[in-house]
Amino acid sequence: MPLNKLAVPNRVVGVKAVRKKLDAGKLSVLFLARDARVSLVSGLARDARSAGIPVEWVDSMIVLGRACAISRGAAAAGVTDLRETGSPETRGYF
């Protein structure tokens, strides 16, 4: 899955935010940085796979952070279900 999938309003960035959405069952895809500390991302990868959520690995934290439009690295990011954003499509405007 290309990183441009993270250029959406319904993304979450950071291990804690991703963990919350993953535990709530509201994550649709998970991105993890290969150079992140294993202790940070191994549990996320394991839990996402067991929940049937695709896991995509990114070369570095810097690349993942830039894909999320932040000015620093990110160990984890994800895309939530569209209904989580409160977007016009889900509120019935379209």
Image (cartoon, rainbow, N blue to C red):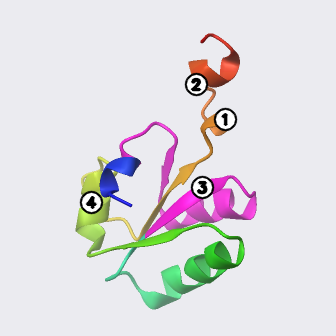
Query: In the image, what residue occupies the spot 50% across and 81% down?
Result: 40
Disc nearer the start of the sequence (3/1): 3
Describe residue 67's horizontal placement relative to residue 46 as left or right.
left
Where is residue 68 drawn, in percent x and y? Answer: 34, 51
Residue 28 at x, y = what percent? 60, 55
Pick the residue in front: 50 or 18.
50
Look at the numbered disc 2 and give the secondary structure of its residue: loop
Cα distance, mark 1 to mark 2? 7 Å
Q: Amino acid at mark 3?
A: Ser
The quarter of the image holding the C terminus is: top right
Between marks 3 and 4, how big is the CA–CA gap?
A: 24 Å
Question: Between marks 2 and 3, how big is the CA–CA gap?
Answer: 16 Å
**Would you call the spot at circle 4 few (<14 residues within 10 Å), some (14-19), or many (20 or more)?**
few
Question: Disc 3 vs disc 4: which is toward the camera?
Answer: 3
Q: Which residue is mark 1?
A: 83
2 or 3: mark nearer the eye: 3
The numbered mark, 4 or 2, whose residue comes first in the sequence reads 4
Q: Which residue is mark 3?
A: 28
Q: From this view, report whether residue 36 is shown above or below residue 52.
A: below
Q: Give the magenta-colored segment's residue range.
A: 6-31
The residue type indicated by label 4 comes to: Arg
Q: Earlier in the sequence, mark 1 or mark 4?
A: 4
Q: Are marks 4 and 2 in contact (CB under 8 Å)?
A: no
Compare marks 2 and 3 and give the one earlier in the sequence: 3
- Check the picture and name the quadrant holding the N terminus: bottom left
Q: Which numbered disc covers residue 87? A: 2
Helix, strand or loop for disc 3: strand
Q: Amino acid at mark 2?
A: Ser
Tag 3 near tag 1, CB within 8 Å:
no
Q: Is residue 83 magenta?
A: no
